[in-house]
Image (cartoon, helix red, strand yellow):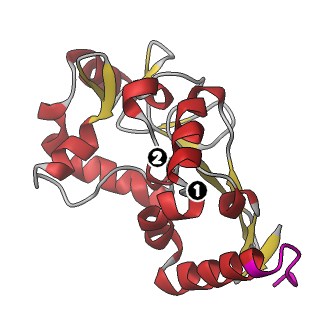
Amino acid sequence: MFQLGKTIVSEDILEKEFVCNLTACKGACCVDGDAGAPLSEEETKILEEIYPKVKPFLRKEGIEAIEAQGVWITGTDGDLETPLIDNKDCAYVIFDGDTALCGIEQAYNQGVVSWKKPVSCHLYPVRVKDFTEFAAVNYDRWDICNPACALGKELEVPVYKFVKEALVRRFGADWYAELEKVAEDLKDDPSPRRR
């Protein structure tokens, strides 16, 4: 772990390799698990605003879940998250054949909304936990992502490079530039001075 501004970062995001492999996993992260995608308070307001534009992209089951539960919910642990369909699929999931995709992202890709998707989804496999004084930035290892780990290793793409756009979105370009410096230091000296 090392400190970067007001974040404590796991070296795993620099050392582990990862590239999503949708043809292998079929978007399992959107349909497996026991909770919806984590949301910030600001993102709940965005979802409320864009839902009418996103709704035409969603499945009937997703619309029903959202209209019964709300565009976002408070999970059992008190965290804000996306609602689920029958405690499984994210309510915003759509399918292309048997591959799960994000209905919000499809609306974004077609220029209907200007918000890509929850930053927690965009960041995956990086998870951020906010505390009072700092945010913890960690690599989340999940067995359903084994194909992504294998592809990342084959292509030699570290986690932080795979999620660059999302890290910049969450922490800013200056923070990411500092992260790249730490990664370079780590390459040059496997035991760099902690920042």
Secondary structure beneath dot 2 equals: helix
Residue positioned 71% across, 59% down in the render = 15
Q: Give the dominant element type of the magenta stretch: helix, strand or loop.
A: loop
Q: Which residue is mark 2?
A: 121
Secondary structure beneath dot 1 equals: helix
What are the residue bounds of the magenta stretch?
188-195
Residue positioned 58% across, 24% down in the render = 33
Residue positioned 46% across, 25% down in the render = 25
The image shows residue 84 at horizontal and vertical percentages of 44, 24
Query: Which numbered tag is attached to residue 43?
Result: none
Q: Is residue 152 magenta?
A: no
Residue 156 placement: quadrant = bottom right
User: Which one is in front, 157 or 77?
Assistant: 157
User: Which one is in front, 95 or 130?
Assistant: 95
Tell me the amino acid under the disc marked 1: Val
Q: Which residue is mark 1?
A: 159
